[in-house]
Image (cartoon, helix red, strand yellow):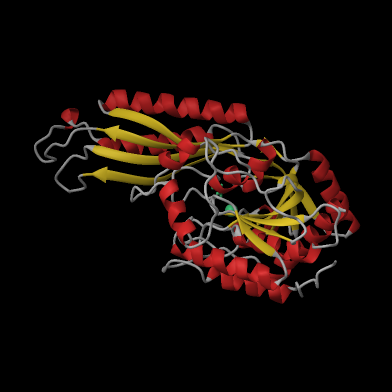
Amino acid sequence: MALPAPDASPASLGELLQALAGFSAPGAGVTRLAYAAHWRAAHRWLAERARAMGLLATPDAAGNLLFHPAQAAPGRGQTALLVGSHLDSVKHGGRYDGALGAVAGLLLAAECAGRTRTPVVGFVTGEEEGSRFGGTLMGARSLLGLVEAAELDRERDESGTTWRQALEEVRAHGGCAPLAAGDRPFAPLFVPALALELHIEQGPVLEAEGLPLGIVERIAGYRRWKASVEGEARHTGTTPPPMKRDALAASAEMVAALEAVGAESGEAARATAGNLRLRPGLFNVVPEHCELWMEMRHVDAARLSAMAAELARRCREIAARRKVVVALQEVSAEDPVPLDPALVQKARALAEELGLRHRVMTSGAAHDAMIFARAGVPSLMVFVPSRRGISHSPEEFTAAEQLWTGYLFMRELCLRLAR
Ligand code: HGY
Ligand code: MN
């Protein structure tokens, strides 16, 4: 029984994105941290929209949301074509990052219902950005049943709330199913035959080349550390320079070393220090402690490992010379991963057939699709352009017709792959 396809249109896509962007903490841009109040409100709203389109909206035990026709029953080993993206955002991020793919997953599940042999199931992962807990891609990893129970108590946010506690609050509002017993608390609701993700590029390539579509063949890996640097509090006025053990000055050299290793590692290398906290933070006290957040990325696993080793070596050298103690704690890491070559070819052929100019490219940003790919699910990402290549900022923007072109392409791709 084919459901009445919703009037998916540039307007309805735009309206859904506009409404979803409204579920945010105050301040510039979109702030929708995993499982927090605005995330829960968005989660409820998406489920309501799905039901209004004739779909069922089933949350799994991690709060990931699956949009499916009634015929595709969850939790029964049903194979499905999964298409979607993440619901959470960075702090003061944009309104398209994750949201475009999540809304596309909802609309595609509705438009494809009853029209394909393999059911098209929309997914919205609850956590991808790592902006609340240390871990990242927690949604895709839990959706696929890859998370161990120990991680539920290990992952904590800045206030000390654990992943388990955050989920208890979501469950109290009906937003997630009970945890499974044993050491795998999340059981997959569907068996993914394929995984597709529509996402903004978040970089400058498509716009620079005037292309409406990017077909992603590889996703860069990353390493993220919190470096703790221990110096010694002393009076800034009375301490002769050679006696200073200055945690902030040492950290500043480490940031410069991070950038230098990035610059020496080829044009695909990325290296950024994103946060620094220090004690005590006064004019007249030599900083005794710093916590420095650093990340490195590369599309090649060996290069990424070499960059990480070189950074550690240089941090140790700086610490020894400045008589401070440094400890690098890795908080999250993913290796680079190729997406499915056969799907890349199929997408390229479809773009040619539809007369859509496009290019095959890598993604410097991490995405849910990398978890599906690493789990052996044939996966593909499709990008639409980002204005001035900006993302993770309130300035993030993609024009309505560009969003719609990406959606139409994904719809045709889904219909063909799921038939
Ligand atoms: O950080 C990333 O690469 C992604 O945007 N979460
Ligand atoms: Mn994203």
Is residue 14 shown left or right of residue 273? right
At a point 44% along the width and 47% down the height, the residue shown is 164
Q: Which quadrant: the N terminus?
A: bottom right
Q: Is residue 243 above or below residue 93?
A: above
- From the top left corner, tell me how far across and down residue 23 is, in percent: 51, 68
Which one is nearer the viewer's eye here, 211 or 64? 64
Is residue 1 shown left or right of residue 149? right
Which one is nearer the viewer's eye here, 167 or 155? 167
At a point 18% along the width and 48% down the height, the residue shown is 282
Is residue 96 shown left or right of residue 282? right
Res 53 → quadrant:
bottom right
At a point 52% along the width and 61% down the height, the residue shown is 174
Which one is nearer the viewer's eye here, 241 or 97? 97
Residue 147 in view (yes/no): yes
- From the top left corner, tell me how far across and down residue 319 is, in percent: 31, 27
- From the top left corner, tell me how far across and down residue 36 is, in percent: 44, 59
Res 403 → quadrant:
bottom right
At a point 19% along the width and 33% down the height, the residue shown is 232
Is residue 239 shown left or right of residue 266? left
- From the top left corner, tell me how far across and down residue 146 is, in percent: 59, 38
Which one is nearer the viewer's eye here, 11 or 57? 57
